[in-house]
Amino acid sequence: EDKVVQSPLSLVVHEGDTVTLNCSYEVTNFRSLLWYKQEKKAPTFLFMLTSSGIEKKSGRLSSILDKKELFSILNITATQTGDSAIYLCAVEAVRITGGGNKLTFGTGTQLKVEL
Amino acid sequence: GAVVSQHPSWVICKSGTSVKIECRSLDFQATTMFWYRQFPKQSLMLMATSNEGSKATYEQGVEKDKFLINHASLTLSTLTVTSAHPEDSSFYICSARDLWGFDDNGYTFGSGTRLTVV
């Protein structure tokens, strides 16, 4: 069974801090790893990673994948209160039976940024 | 970019009744759509994969007769919660895959439906 574990489950930081969120996985037929930000409703896409060691960056957010050690990190620098959300890691894998791909989500990290 | 519309955004129903949730891809065709369930402070759990023109693929432990999925066209999938009970109360989210969405591999999410069964 595919498994995705995120840590920490929650954390509280002050504005301006840098945070690192972790995601480890065990999946069969790995295809990609995706990071999402979820505030009140639907998750919004942040990054998709397929290759090891290549950092993806978007403003204050960045992410990298290690396919040998089976983990990814999401970094947020100079955090702002608007970064408060649940950050979800999902791994896309090819189904063994039934065809197609599926996403398996981690438990998420609840981030709260205080003034 | 790709947009997925999900309706209703919230619904309250009586125990024993059925509720239908719609998921539409607005500007792309989706041969595959996914239905997730999310409990408070928990992650998204894949319930089933909806395949246009064929039967849905259900995850282990999900009752097919309880959660009916229909994907009759390339832009619409529906999830019907039959004979709903309070334990079915949850947040249901759909996702549609745009095969041409190379940047994010095409997984776009609807805004979710909060179902409360009383």
Image: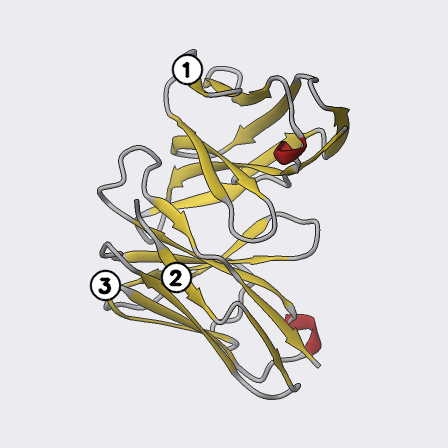
In the visual, does A11 lie left or right of B34? right
Residue at the (39%, 71%) spot, across then down = B78
Among numbered discs 2 and 3, the one appearing first in the sequence: 2
Distance from disc 2 to disc 3, alpha carbons, whole Å, reads: 14 Å
C-alpha span from label 3 to label 1: 34 Å
Badge 1 marks a residue whose secondary structure is loop
Return the residue at label 2: B5
Q: Counting other residues with Cα less than 10 Å from the Cα at mark 3, is it few (<14), some (14-19), or many (20 or more)?
A: some
Residue B30 in the image: state x and y as whole percent.
26, 56
Q: Secondary structure at mark 3?
A: loop
Q: Circle 1 sits on which residue?
A: A52
Q: Nearer the viewer, mark 2 or mark 3?
A: 2
Classify 10 Å Cα crowding around label 1: few (below 14), some (14-19), many (20 and above).
Answer: some
**Picture layout, residue A58 above or below residue B60:** above
Q: Relative to B101, is B91 above or below?
A: below
Which residue is under mark 3?
B74
Identify the amino acid type marked 3.
Leu
Residues under numbered marks 2 and 3 in contact, where contact means CB atoms less than 8 Å apart: no
- Expressed as whole percent of the image width and height from the top left, the position of residue B103 reads 31, 32
**Which kind of residue does numbered mark 1 sit on?**
Ser
User: Is A9 positioned to the left or the right of A66 in the image?
Assistant: right
Q: Is A33 left, or right, of A114 in this rendering?
A: left
**Mark 1 → mark 2, Cα distance in angstroms:** 34 Å
Question: Which is in the foreground here, disc 1 or disc 2?
Answer: 2
Give the quarter of the image for residue B37: bottom right
> Closest to the observer: B17 or A81?
A81
Q: Residue furthest front?
A: A115
